[in-house]
Image (cartoon, grey):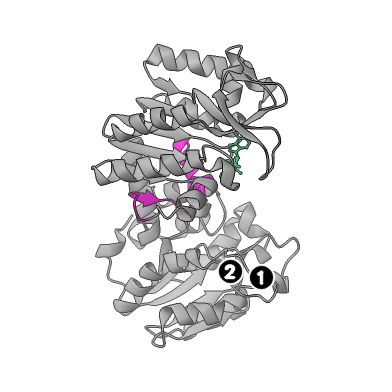
Amino acid sequence: MSTFSKFNFGGKKALVRVDFNVPLNEKYQITDDTRMRAAIPTIQKVLQDGGSVILMSHFGRPKEGPEKKYSLIHLVPHLQKLLGDEPEVFFAADCIGEAATKASALLQKGDVLLLENLRFHKEEEKGDMGFAEQLSKLGDVYINDAFGTAHRAHASTAIVADFFDADKKMFGLLMEGEVSSAEKVLLQSEKPFTAIIGGAKVSDKILIIENLLEKATDIIIGGGMAYTFWKAQGKDIGNSLCEDDRLSLASSLLEKAKAKGVNIHLPIDSTIADKFAADANTSNCNSGEIPAGWMGLDIGTQARLDFSEVILRSKTILWNGPMGVFEMEKFQAGTKTIAEAVATATQKGAFSLVGGGDSVAAVNQFGFNDKVSYVSTGGGAMLEFFEGKELPGIAAINK
Ligand code: AMP
């Protein structure tokens, strides 16, 4: 594996796997270009060195071959705008075959070529060797800058790397940032290390909690998943979210934590509501004494203080999942308070990593995205990394 920043791309064609899976409206206009902007520093470094860039990405979920609405051609004007007038952005109507080969052969130093959607070929998601080999022939070096798909063993994210020598494959700047931040938390965490886990379901977060029991000093559990833990201890949770088939699992996680000396923090109280709605009547009560007909939709006032105290004495913080139904104003105070505490701890010198779709949406919504150490772009990939799994996109570059 080579190091991107030390590599000289002069005269080289860099085949770069990016994540350009951006949302489009019905007029094919990009409604959020975050993912495209995230790839620009990597592209610019290659161009500045005197190389050319071949970009490949998936886009949406086309079912059977090409579909207009999933064509990456819609992104060309915006990509040109992001890169400025200097490099010319070309488009190849297919990611393999004659269209791609010809376009790649014609590339001059300083040019950018965007290939058509990889998923127009079913071989991409199957991780087909032949397809990966065809992709590999387009470039002299391979750069993976798509952390969001690093947990998939697809042709362009993992298999293609096998066709490049170790010194000709590397992570791009975005991927380097993601991997080094995640490794800093999981492998080199300064203690106390607090993991804040929230969101709807325990079942989605079991593996991450189990793995963090080996690493963290404190685990804060908030969101809808906290109520399964309360009920497992025989408490009354009213109509709160609960996975009855996970009660014994919740008990065993609590026991395991105790045996390992990891502090599990559950919200002692909750903001409760008489219905799951923005205009519900609300109140604050102990999380284990929620009246019938009421449900916990946010951590309560005391829990916010307790959790903040734990966060403020932490040196490493990992946050995945909101503390409540933050999409509704009445139930966003918990998530907002936690975002504030993470920002303050970061200011005091802690390393904080926020990841997972909804917690990222929350820090962005509350304006804390530049007050934490790192905001991960990869939801599923980040979750699997912290579950302790080896991500194919990372392994393919490292091996
Ligand atoms: P997840 O995708 O598992 O991280 O869950 C995120 C979702 O959990 C968000 O849409 C939240 O609204 C929801 N959520 C958080 N807390 C609660 C709660 N107490 N009851 C129901 N849903 C919740």
- Looking at the rendered structure, the kind of residue marked 2 is Thr
* Quarter assignment of residue 275: top right
Mark 2 highlights which residue?
Answer: 31
Residues at circles 1 and 2 in contact by the CB criterion of under 8 Å: yes
Q: x and y percent of residue 66 in the render? A: 71, 70
Mark 1 highlights which residue?
Answer: 25
| Residue 206 visible from this viewpoint | no
Of residue 74 and residue 93, the one placed in the foreground of this image is 74
Q: In this rendering, is residue 143 above or below 101?
A: above
Specify the farthest residue to the right: 64
Q: x and y percent of residue 242 in the render? A: 66, 26
**Region rendered in magenta:** 370-392
Q: Is residue 379 magenta?
A: yes
* Quarter assignment of residue 298: top right
* Quarter assignment of residue 1: bottom left
* Quadrant location, ligand no. 1: top right
Q: In this rendering, is residue 102 above or below 296?
A: below
- Looking at the rendered structure, the kind of residue marked 1 is Asn
Q: In this rendering, is residue 212 above or below 358?
A: above
Instruction: Check disc 2 and report its element: helix, strand or loop.
Output: loop
Q: x and y percent of residue 87 in the render? A: 41, 84
The residue lying at 46 percent from left, 52 percent from top is 366
The residue lying at 59 percent from left, 34 percent from top is 204
Q: How would you rate the neighbour count of disc 1 (Cα within 10 Å): few for under 14, some for 14-19, many for 20 or more?
A: few
User: How far apart are the alpha carbons under marks 1 and 2?
Assistant: 7 Å
Q: In this rendering, is residue 60 above or below 346?
A: below
Of residue 252 and residue 155, the one placed in the foreground of this image is 252
The residue lying at 40 percent from left, 54 percent from top is 369
Q: x and y percent of residue 370 in the render? A: 36, 56
